[in-house]
Image (tube, coloured by chain):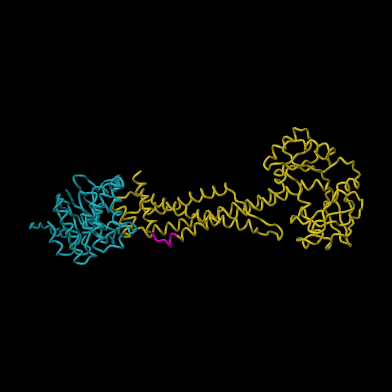
Chain colours: A cyan, B yellow
Amino acid sequence: MIIVKDLKRCYGTGDTAVRALKGVSFEINKGEFVAIMGASGSGKTTLLRILALLDDATGGEYTIRGLKVSSLPEAERSYYRLTQVGYIFQDYALISEMSAAENVYLLSMMEGKSKKESYKTALEALEKVGLKGKHDRVPDELSGGEKQRVAIARAIAKKPDILFADEPCANLDTTNSKQVLDVFKELNEKYGQTIVMVTHEPWHTDYVDRVITFKDGSLLSDEKKMKE
Amino acid sequence: MINDIRVGALIAYCSVKRGNKKTLIFIVFVLSLIFMNLVFLPSMIGGLSGLFTGFMQDYPYGDIVIEPMGDNTYINNADNVLKKVRAVEGVRAGTKRLDVGASINHKQKVVGVTITGMLPTEEYEISRYPYIISEGDFLSDLSRDEIIIGAMIAGTGFGSEIYDNLGEVRPGAFVDVTYSNGVKRTYKVKGIMEGTFEVVDLNALVHYKEIEDVYGLEGKEATSVVVRVDEQGTEAQIQDKIREAGVNEQIFTWADKSESLIRQAMQSMGAIDIMSKIVSLIVGAALVLIIIYINVLNRKKEIGILKAVGITPRSIVLSYAFLSTFYVSLGISAGLVLYLSLMFYFQANPVTFYETMEISPTIDPVLLIQSVVTMLTLSVIAGILPAWSVSRESILKAIWGR
């Protein structure tokens, strides 16, 4: 589903240049739940941002479902982000002045769905992440775990091909982290959702099928886990 | 595009609905002051212009004034002219006047004046002279050897300290008048007129017959025939009708006369007005720009997030266009309330200008519409620019600042 070939990312130029990715290659299959691990500065978040079209690679290429998305013009990248990719931020990244439902159905409206249909989709997505009845609450009225689940609902409401999650539990306690990971697990197992999650917590790997480890911008290991 | 508008509207709606109300009130307050600044001075200048125009109509020129043709000193058959004028439909009243130069002497003090010879009873329908007598009485048809003196030259009104005056002449006092042809007459002061207008208060009035006698005229001459019309605004049509009626003298409407006398002054004020408008608009646009820019900077991360999840930059820019339109509309509405309140206040309590003139501002709907449209347009542009600029930034820079 995702084919990454010799992907490079360099920030800055000359002596101050930082090579965040030094030419990584791997493939991710449809329906996989992959954890990308590594120490701070290993390049895992950079990789995720490039794959989610939030940043550009400076070398190499990658395809998603056969489409060379790295070379798409900005308007198409925007549409691709809207319809094909779900991205979950470490700090939830919700719009503070929008309710949980509005945060979610904004994207459906952008896709051209009617307000009624968008609202229905949003409620279904919020129910899927265990937030039934909390659709009217604004982010300030939700706990960290709930906010992250709204972010997940926003990402999955459009039924994306791939869900990218950048350290989704970084700001959560263990209980809330487990709730979020349970949601991911359910999405993966029940709906076959492909998930690529950046994390640095070893125990998070209990939930995934495969662990790709980075070190200093290079792929250190790629380990498939046996399903229970 | 429809989706962009819907999403833009939803973002703007949520921002207003759940945004900081104190900030909203502050923005609206500032915008209302900007709007006020835009319309208040022109309204005052309009009031001043109206005041001068009113003076010109009320005293020297009426609605229409007929003056001698070419180099002639007099309209030679003024009675005939008056007869024709009075027969014109839409003319309310007309009278003839004789303006002459003279000097007035009182206890060794001499001032030069224009003395107007008039028919007192006819003036009640034509001018406000009969109604501005601050001391004593106005002339009557039997007034001979009597004079009305303007307050500034009498030395009793405002401006006496600026202009030469006769040193507090009161009704009942006697003054010597030397006309431009050298004839001297002594008049008893019947009244002091105070029109709070130099053209009036620096002059004097006598009966028409006095000038006729002094200059040896035959009872038909006039230096002007002053006309009042039934309905304001019809002056130009009636001017044509008077011409068609066979009056071959120079015929001016008050506007024609004002053109030379007032327009120069108004042009200077107009220049101030235009400069003030431009400055107000620049300040207004800059303020809206700053307000929206700060707003955009505070939401830079949100803009990045919106882009990251697939919201188009056009939707984001549109949301700010809606937001600034909303802010500005509220600001204009509040500004209008403020403006109208001030207008009504100043209409009830006119501003005293030059210590004697009371200026009531005028509400000009065209000016209001122009100001609303200009402010909306400028503000929306000022609102869109920073949003457009930020929405073009890379997602990484907008969200994470790099």
- Kindly identify the residue that appears in the image at 75 percent across and 39 percent down: B251
State the quadrant of the N terminus of chain B: top left
**Viewer-closest of A176 and A123:** A123
Residue B346 showing in the rendered view: yes
Instruction: Say left or right for B298 vs B213.
Output: left
Q: Residue at x 84, y 57 (%)?
A: B111
- Specify the principal SS of the magenta part: helix
Q: Position of residue B215 (x, y in %)?
A: 90, 46
Spot the residue most to the bottom.
A173
Let me know if residue B20 is in the magenta part. Answer: yes
In which image quadrant can residue B112 be found?
bottom right
Quadrant location of the C terminus of chain B?
bottom left
Observer-nearest of B317 and B8: B8
Residue in view at x 29 percent, y 62 percent? A16
* Residue A208 figure quarter: bottom left
Please say whether residue B235 is one of the residues in the magenta stretch. Answer: no
Whether residue A205 sits left or right of residue B273 in the image: it is left
Left or right: B147 in relation to B389? right
- Residue A86: x and y in percent read 23, 52
Q: Residue at x 15, y 58 (%)?
A: A212
Q: How many marks?
A: 0
Above-or-below relation of B83 to A26: above
Residues shaded magenta: B19-24
In the depicted structure, whether residue B93 falls above or below residue B177 = above
